[in-house]
Amino acid sequence: MKAIKTAVVGASGYTGAELLRLLLMHPAAELVCVTSRQYEGEPLEKVFPRFRGVQGSQLEFTAPSADTIAAAGAEVAFLALPHGVAAEYAIALLEKGIRVIDLSADFRLNSAEVYEEFYGHPHPAPELLDEAVYGLPELKGRSEAIKSAKLVASPGCYPTSIITPLVPLLEKGLIDPASIVTCSMSGVSGAGKTGNVLFSYCEANESVRAYGVPKHRHLSEIEQELSIAAGQAVQISFTPHLVPAHNGICTTTSATLTGDADAIGAALEEAYGGSDFVRLLGKGQPADTKNVTRTNFLDIGWDYDPRTGRVLLLSAEDNLGKGAASQAVQSMNLMFELSATEGLQNI
């Protein structure tokens, strides 16, 4: 098997480090370029001692440059960069014929106007929005689109946990789109490596708090994908919370039932019964983050409350895994005609 030559741009953050771990151990991938201005010239194994002794861990960080990435022979580049910054690298890499998997928000939205509304500045490359594929492989038709894509916009962590269980129910008209309320809890790594004191150990430990209310940026892509599924504009109430854990997301979503309660499980089974990475727990079974951390699995349970007439959807994932790095690697597998599970079957 010919190894896929890969690059990681912005490889020193939490998501970047998880990408490195997955790609170093991936049987069909070869890391040929990793970038970090902070650690330029330093080998991976020095910056991340956990990688010592692993083949490829002597590779040195370089300053980010499309020319350098192309000279290394990269066929695909993962962009683990902030929104607004990723787009400039995506443009340059695509021009050099390198396929791009962007983990920022720069290409997740179909509308440049919505991007500006939620991210506070004009879209840096609106001409690429029609070309980008929203990389949630479990959605209908997305795996095929990802296979031929030159630019994949890997979904946000919260959206993956919210969109996946809701889409089959919206497609079948089983819930009222106007009634959707969701609450998510995320580990502190979701904020990335930051100097913000609110995400420091002493502030986050032994504490739970809401943030990003009432209009978290991820609402934009959540509502976009739910609107596609429902065939009408959908707006939801979404409240994220920070919890004192390193990684993991637990989401509870509720909506008013408009169909038959017995059809809920059947709709989820029809959509994901053959999925490699969505595990259906069944009725009355809450999802637990301890069962999905450091994996690419998304666990979904559900229930129905006859007192309120509301459906409960209960999901859990690793925000650095299925919510970021491992989902991006899943897209790489599809783009290069590998099994979706290649290098991702860790439990």
Image (cartoon, rainbow, N blue to C red):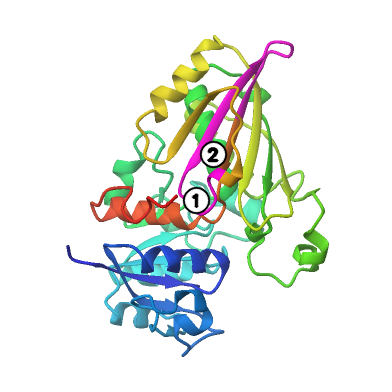
Depicted 139 relative to depicted 326: above or below = above
Which residue is label 1 attached to?
108
Residue 236, located in which quarter of the rendered image? Answer: top right
Depicted 214 relative to depicted 68: above or below = above
Which sits in the foreground, 195 or 343?
Answer: 343
Farthest residue in the left direction? 1
The boundaries of the magenta stretch are 291-313
- Disc 1 residue crowd, few under 14, some 14–19, many 20+, Cα 10 Å: many
- Relative image position of residue 156 (x, y in whole percent): 55, 50
Which residue is label 2 attached to?
224
Q: Is residue 279 left or right of residue 203?
A: left
Which sits in the foreground, 242 or 293?
Answer: 293
Tell me, yes or no, if residue 131 can be seen here.
Answer: no
- Relative image position of residue 257 (x, y in whole percent): 62, 15
Q: Which mark is residue 266?
A: none
Q: Which amino acid lies under the numbered mark 1 shown in the image of this protein?
A: Arg
**Which element is circle 1 on?**
loop
The alpha-carbon separation of the residues under discs 1 and 2 comes to 9 Å
**Magenta span includes 268:** no
- What residue is at 49 percent from the left and 64 percent from the top? 18
Label 2 near label 1: C-beta < 8 Å? yes
Q: Is residue 87 left or right of residue 26?
A: right
**Which element is circle 2 on?**
helix
- What residue is at 53 percent from the left and 43 percent from the top? 160
- Relative image position of residue 266 (x, y in whole percent): 45, 17
Q: Which amino acid lies under the numbered mark 2 shown in the image of this protein?
A: Gln
Residue 272, located in which quarter of the rendered image? Answer: top left
N-term mark: 1 or 2: 1
- What residue is at 47 percent from the left and 26 percent from the top? 168
